[in-house]
Image (cartoon, rainbow, N blue to C red):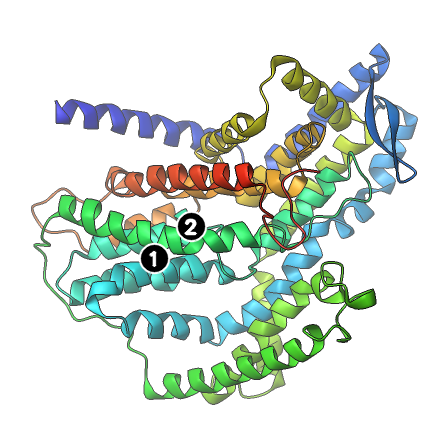
């Protein structure tokens, strides 16, 4: 019976993998969607499609009537050509992500982030190793790829050196890095990226609406300790017992922190502390240079400049680490590190160009507004609103994530539809974005289309035992499924509690408009 169940699961997962692999590249998807909008806009224009709704006009609530515009008439063609460059250069996520990468890229290139993670894991007592690995995985998302490349293989080696199954260590790290992808105690590169897309989508309805990178931080920070505890319990009580004792050769863990790295880490920590003290001096006093008028905080220059503030938070200790560890010899090395980090964003920049055109077309033609208002009216007429609607959106995101791996690409497609629609029934873009992040993170670890999935399989295969079935797609997904389900259930319950109590979800972030 158990074998039959496994066969059905394997068949289901293989089908998902097959369908997902048949999808075009995200850039191609945006091109196709843009062409679809052109055709649909012409049809809607000729039909005289329009809609009336309660919106914002001249800064005040008023009934607004919008009519569909075509991209295939003379005016539309002029707009597509004349706005192509400005659509791209003014695309909110573009600048924020690139600026953040200037700082984080240096910290990553010099080895500061990698050494900090190694130091954390290597100093951990055996009884706490699962919790610390999950926590380190969650926090590593500040620097995006470093958790996948360094922490996951390191964790497998650490478990092996402690006499535990290396795949349990791999699973714990993978759960933190990818399953807890959105949760963090700090602002990472994903926050400005998603908030920029959310801003563009929100402005379809309200041109003055801005979603800031800190808008989900309270909820996501509160998620960290719970995900850490649950991830550790799943590893120790569910995953490792199923794996059983490791029958391979036990090896000593590598990647030790050297004396020079320890010295560099201490110096970098001191530099980070000095930076935080300076920022506190500029922000904490009501008359601080980065406070707003009358000492205001939420709309202060500090909040508006959170991306460069965070970039410097990584840049300064990254440079100090590089100098002490002798990874940086002169200013040219620093510039090279920044250039290298931007070079890795090439695919994202191409994606941003076509995503920006798609979002602008959706806005210009008024199809986004018409679809949003019509959808909102339908939801209200059926009574399908409230937290039930939000949880359904979370589940929808989970399903979409199985077929499309990129968080930003999915959100660039979903945000222009769901943010305006849910704004019409009273939910903030900030809250809709939060619901998306829960669904997107929860199924990362069981999606074969997640960009690092093949690499995780390769890491697992290092610990294959001769005579036993080799690690593959089914091995990883079956191992990660408990994390995915439990993370999703927990996050949904926490979201329901947050929604019921009406708590703020972040700095400048609320649930209802």
Vertical relation: 147 (above or below) 420: below
Residue ID at (81%, 27%): 365
Mark 1: secondary structure: helix
Name the quadrant of the C terminus: top right
Q: Which residue is mark 2?
A: 180
Viewed as shown, does residue 29 lie left or right of 52?
left
CB contact under 8 Å: marks 2 and 1: yes
Image point (45%, 71%), residue name: 113
> How packed is label 1: few (under 14 Cα within 10 Å), some, or many (20 or more)?
many
Residue 410 in view of the camera: yes
Q: Is 72 on the left-hand or right-hand side of 394?
A: right
Determine whether 249 is above or below 415 in the image. below
The image position of residue 506, as x and y in percent, is 60, 52
Give the spatial CA distance, label 2 vs label 1: 9 Å
Residue 325 falls in image quadrant = bottom left
What residue is drawn where x is 34% and y is 57%?
A: 134
Looking at the picture, tell me which residue is in the foreground, 443 or 29. Answer: 443
73 or 300, which is in the foreground? 300
**x and y percentages locating residue 114 in the rendered image:** 41, 71
- The 10 Å Cα crowd at callout 2, few under 14, some 14 to 19, many 20 or more, is many
82 to 312, vertically: above or below: above
Question: Does residue 448 appear in the picture of this structure?
Answer: no
| Residue 496, x across and y down, in percent | 49, 36
Q: Is residue 208 left or right of residue 306?
A: right
- The N terminus is located in which quarter? top left
Circle nearer the N terminus (2, 1): 1
On residue 386, the disc is: none
Tell me the SS state at disc 2: loop
Residue carrying label 1:
134
Choose between 499 and 249: the one closer to the eye: 499
């Amino acid at each position: 019976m158990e074998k039959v169940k496994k066969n059905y699961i394997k068949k289901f997962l293989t089908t998902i993998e097959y369908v997902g692999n048949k999808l075009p590249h995200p850039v191609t998807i945006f091109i196709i969607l843009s062409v679809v909008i052109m055709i649909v806009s012409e049809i809607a224009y000729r039909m005289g499609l329009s809609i009336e709704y309660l919106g914002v006009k001249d800064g005040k609530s008023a009934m607004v009537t919008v009519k569909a515009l075509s991209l295939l008439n003379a005016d539309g063609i002029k707009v597509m050509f004349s706005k192509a460059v400005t659509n791209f250069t003014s695309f909110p996520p573009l600048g924020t992500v690139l600026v953040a990468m200037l700082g984080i890229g240096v910290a990553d290139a010099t080895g500061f982030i990698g050494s900090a993670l190694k130091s954390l894991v290597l100093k951990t007592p055996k009884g706490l190793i699962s919790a610390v690995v999950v926590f380190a995985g969650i926090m590593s998302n500040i620097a995006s790829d470093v958790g996948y490349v360094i922490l996951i293989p390191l964790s497998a080696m650490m478990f092996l050196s402690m006499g535990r199954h290396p795949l349990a260590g791999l699973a714990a790290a993978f759960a933190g890095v990818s399953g807890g992808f959105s949760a963090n105690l700090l602002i990472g590169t994903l926050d400005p990226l998603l908030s920029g897309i959310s801003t563009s989508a929100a402005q379809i309805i309200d041109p003055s609406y801005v979603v800031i990178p800190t808008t989900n931080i309270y909820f996501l920070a509160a998620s960290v300790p719970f995900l850490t505890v649950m991830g550790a319990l799943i590893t120790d009580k569910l995953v490792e017992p199923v794996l059983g004792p490791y029958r391979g050769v036990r090896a000593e863990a590598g990647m030790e922190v050297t004396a020079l790295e320890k010295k560099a880490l201490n110096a970098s920590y001191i530099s980070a502390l000095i930076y935080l003290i300076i920022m506190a001096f500029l922000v904490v006093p009501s008359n601080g240079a980065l406070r707003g008028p009358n000492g205001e905080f939420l709309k202060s220059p500090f909040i508006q400049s959170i991306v460069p503030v965070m970039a410097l938070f990584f840049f300064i200790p990254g440079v100090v680490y590089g100098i002490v560890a002798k990874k940086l010899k002169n200013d040219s090395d620093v510039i090279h590190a920044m250039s290298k980090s931007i070079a890795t964003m090439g695919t994202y920049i191409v994606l941003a160009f076509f995503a920006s055109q798609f979002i602008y077309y959706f806005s210009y033609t008024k199809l986004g507004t018409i679809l949003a208002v019509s959808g909102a009216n339908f939801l209200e007429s059926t009574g399908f609103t409230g937290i039930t609607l939000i949880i359904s959106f979370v589940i929808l995101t989970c399903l979409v994530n199985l077929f499309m791996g990129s968080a930003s690409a999915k959100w660039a497609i979903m945000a222009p539809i769901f943010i305006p629609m849910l704004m019409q029934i009273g939910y903030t873009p900030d809250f809709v974005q939060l619901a998306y992040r829960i669904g997107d993170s929860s199924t990362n670890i069981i999606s074969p289309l997640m960009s690092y999935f093949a690499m995780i399989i390769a890491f697992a295969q290092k610990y294959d035992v001769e005579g036993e079935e080799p690690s593959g797609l089914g091995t990883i997904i079956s191992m990660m499924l408990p994390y995915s389900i439990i993370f999703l259930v927990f996050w949904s319950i926490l979201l329901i509690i947050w929604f019921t109590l009406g708590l703020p979800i972040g700095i400048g972030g609320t649930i209802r408009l």
